[in-house]
Image (tube, rainbow, N blue to C red):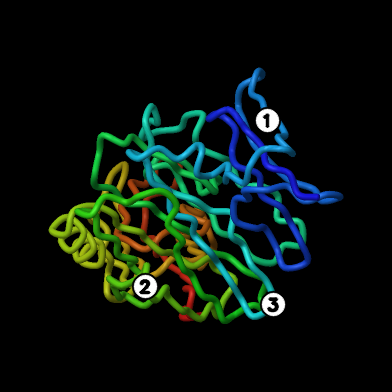
Amino acid sequence: FPVTFKKDSTVTTPITYDEKGWSEPQSELDPWNGYAVYTDINSAEITLTPFLETDSSVARITFVEEWYLNIRLESPSYINYSAEIGRRKYAKDMVDIFDTPVFPEIDNTLSLSMDLNGTKPFNYMRDIRDIDELNGVWNLKLDAHENEKILSVSGNVKGSIPQEISIAMVDIPERKIVYDFLEKGIDLTKESRVAYDLKLVVGDEEYVMTTAQSILTEIPEMFSLSQNYPNPFNPSTTLQFGLAERSITTLEIFNILGESVAKVVDESLDAGFYNFKIDMRGLASGMYFYRLTATSENGHQ
C-alpha cells in the first residue's frame, strides 16, 4: 500500500520515472517503485510514515509565505515534470541547498533545465530563491529527441502565490510573450537540434510587463555580423555579431589564401548581441576575412 513520508527541508520531494519520463514531485510512495531525491548535506533524512492520516507531504513542507511552480514539459510520447521554481524562507538567489541539479535523462527524450539566476550553466532542474524578493526572471532551456517536435509547457502552482504576483512566459525563438501561461500554458514546435529558450518572468504586474518587453527588445530581430573595429588594427580588433535565436555558432578568421587561421567561437550561444576582442599578434601583417555561421532553432543559417 502507498505510504506518506516526512523529510528535512534540505531534501527534495521524491520524483519517479516511468516509460514516459520524470514525474512531478510526489506526495506518496507506491510499493515496488523507485524514487529519486537530492540533498547536498550528509545528515538529511526522509522518514516513511505508513500509518498517518492522509496528509500530503508537499502540504507539510509548504508554508504560507512560500510558493512553488512545477513546470511540465510534454510531447505526444513523453513527459518531464521534474522542473520547479519558487521562493521560500532561508533560500538564496544563488546556489544553495534548495537548488537541485538535473537528474539523468534515462532515455534521452525530453529535457527541461535552467541556470541559477543567470549565473550558472543550464545544469539545474530546481531553482528556489529568497522569499523576501518579489520580482525575478528564470531562464529555461528545453531539449528533445529529434522525433519529438511538438511540445507543450504548462505550470502547476504548489503553495499560495501572493495575489500581487503576475507570471508571463517569453518565447525567445517566436519573439512572443504569453501573459496567460498559468491558465493556458504554451505550445511550441522544435525543428532543429538546438535547444529551445524560454524565460519565465515573475513579479508585480508592472515589472512583468516591462521586463518581458525589455527581454525581446534586447534580442536582435535578425542575424547580423558587423564591421570589425578598429580597422586597420594592431595588435587587436573586436568582432561584433547578433543572434536572433539560440544557435550553433562558428566565428572563424581566414587569411587572404582562404586558410583558417583562428576559430574564435565554436559553440551553442543564446540569442543576443556579442563582442569578441581578438588578439592578432603572432599572425603576419596583411588582410584577413572573418565568417559567421549560425544554425538557429528554426534551421536558418
Q: Position of residue 259 (x, y in %)?
A: 54, 63
Look at discs 3 and 2 and give the one toward the viewer: 2
Query: Do tag 3 and tag 2 residues touch (Cβ < 8 Å)?
Result: no
Query: Do tag 2 and tag 1 residues touch (Cβ < 8 Å)?
Result: no
Q: Position of residue 10 (x, y in %)?
A: 55, 29
Q: Position of residue 228 (x, y in %)?
A: 27, 59
Write the residue at 26% across / 34% down.
132
Assign a secondary structure to mark 2. helix
Q: Most extreme residue toward the right, as rendered?
A: 32
Q: Position of residue 175 (x, y in %)?
A: 31, 75
Q: Nearer the viewer, residue 259 or 108?
A: 108
**Is residue 253 in sight in this rendering?**
no
In this rendering, the answer to whether 220 lies above or below 167 is below
In this rendering, the answer to whether 108 lies above or below 6 is below
Assign a secondary structure to mark 1. strand
Q: Nearer the viewer, residue 260 or 4?
A: 4
Write the residue at 76% across / 49% down.
2
Q: Which mark is residue 183?
A: 2
Q: For the residue carrying disc 3, how many other residues have a C-alpha within 10 Å: few (<14), some (14-19), or many (20+)?
A: some
**Upstream in the sequence, badge 1 or badge 3?**
1
Q: Amino acid at mark 2?
A: Glu
In space, the residues marked 3 and 2 are separated at their CA atoms by 23 Å
